[in-house]
Image (spheres, helix red, strand yellow):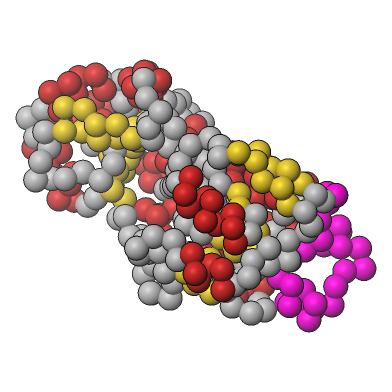
Amino acid sequence: MFSRRRLLTGAVATAAALVLAACGGGSSDSEAESTGSAASDAAFPITVKHALGETVIEKKPERVATVQWANHEVPLALGIVPVGLAKANFGDADGDGYLPWAKEKVDELGGEAPVLFDETDGIDFEAVADTQPDIILATYSGLTEEDYKTLSDIAPTIPYPNGPWETSWRDMIKLSSQALGQSSAGDELIASIEKQMTDEAAKYPQLKGKKTMFLTHVDTSDLSKVSFYTDKDTRAQFFSDLGMGTPDSIAKASAATEEFSQEVSAETVDTFDDVEIIVTYGDDKLLKSLKDDPILSKMPAVANGAIVALDGTSEVGTAANPTPLAISYVLGDYVKMLADAADKVDAAQ
């Protein structure tokens, strides 16, 4: 845990320092806790363009609410405790409503605890409204136009820049920090995370260029179909961040769709002969099922055992979908798992 906390601290330290510098004399501790925000580096009003139009923020937001997956991580990384955020509904091992990297930052920053929105049945618009936000962040989300309109009636809302559930961690930071008037701090945070990723990947030169595919959750009772994330999904983009390669087969399939995932018949699995490493959610039972299957076992990655099977409820499994705070928290563990798979590829050559 020490190494992960050290990484997390390093990832946000530069951004935090920049925010403090922007504060000049700064607010007192009590003032910081009551507003939950930091000084801005931009003049308001600010107009933020996105996939559903554009949003005008008239003045620096003091009360920040976030909905859907991980959108609270950017304000937290910038020293802002949201007044409300979506309760973790996946990967929350201790059931406290937080993923560990978010809980760590909330505890570190202190102040009034956020309201946790229960999104089991969708966005709780009434609960969001009750927090009286000045802004609502949803840059990584699946907001519909109706959702966006309803939220915008509560407060200026920032949805995704391109398509639902496609926003990279970089764009999460860029869009949210812009809306908060802290673009410079956002840029510093991105640079810090990128350096950590580069430094960690450099420890394992065998990773470079390895062509990697991320299968979606595999149903071992029906292996007649193969589902995978396209290069529009953040899980697949994570590999590129680490210097790994995108198989030509995945690039071709991705170019033919706007979706973040695809499904093909297992009978066409020879299409993926260029896949060297497979990452997916599962356990030893899954690995055995893939190796025993007469069709899927012919995939080079399966034949070589170059498979990273992630427990979907674990910290690493959850953070394989990279978000601004999660990356640093699990980076060392995840990269090591990928490197072990890369060793199997090299051993088979």
Q: 86 or 238, which lies in front?
A: 86
Q: Check the picture and name the quadrant holding the C terminus.
A: top left
The percent coordinates of residue 182 (x first, y second) are: 76, 52
| 171 w.r.t. 128: above or below | above
The percent coordinates of residue 266 (x first, y second) are: 15, 28
| 159 w.r.t. 267: above or below | below
The percent coordinates of residue 262 (x first, y second) are: 29, 31
Q: Residue at x 25, y 35 (%)?
A: 227
Reply yes or no: does residue 36 show up in magenta. yes
Reply yes or no: does residue 253 show up in magenta. no
Tell me where the magenta segment starts and ends, as one range.
19-43
Instruction: Classify residue 63 as left or right of residue 115.
Output: right
Residue 67 visible in the displayed image: yes
| 343 w.r.t. 128: above or below | above
Q: 116 or 144, which lies in front?
A: 144
Q: Residue at x 49, y 32 (%)?
A: 240
Instruction: Classify residue 36 as left or right of residue 334.
Output: right
Q: Residue at x 36, y 41 (%)?
A: 340
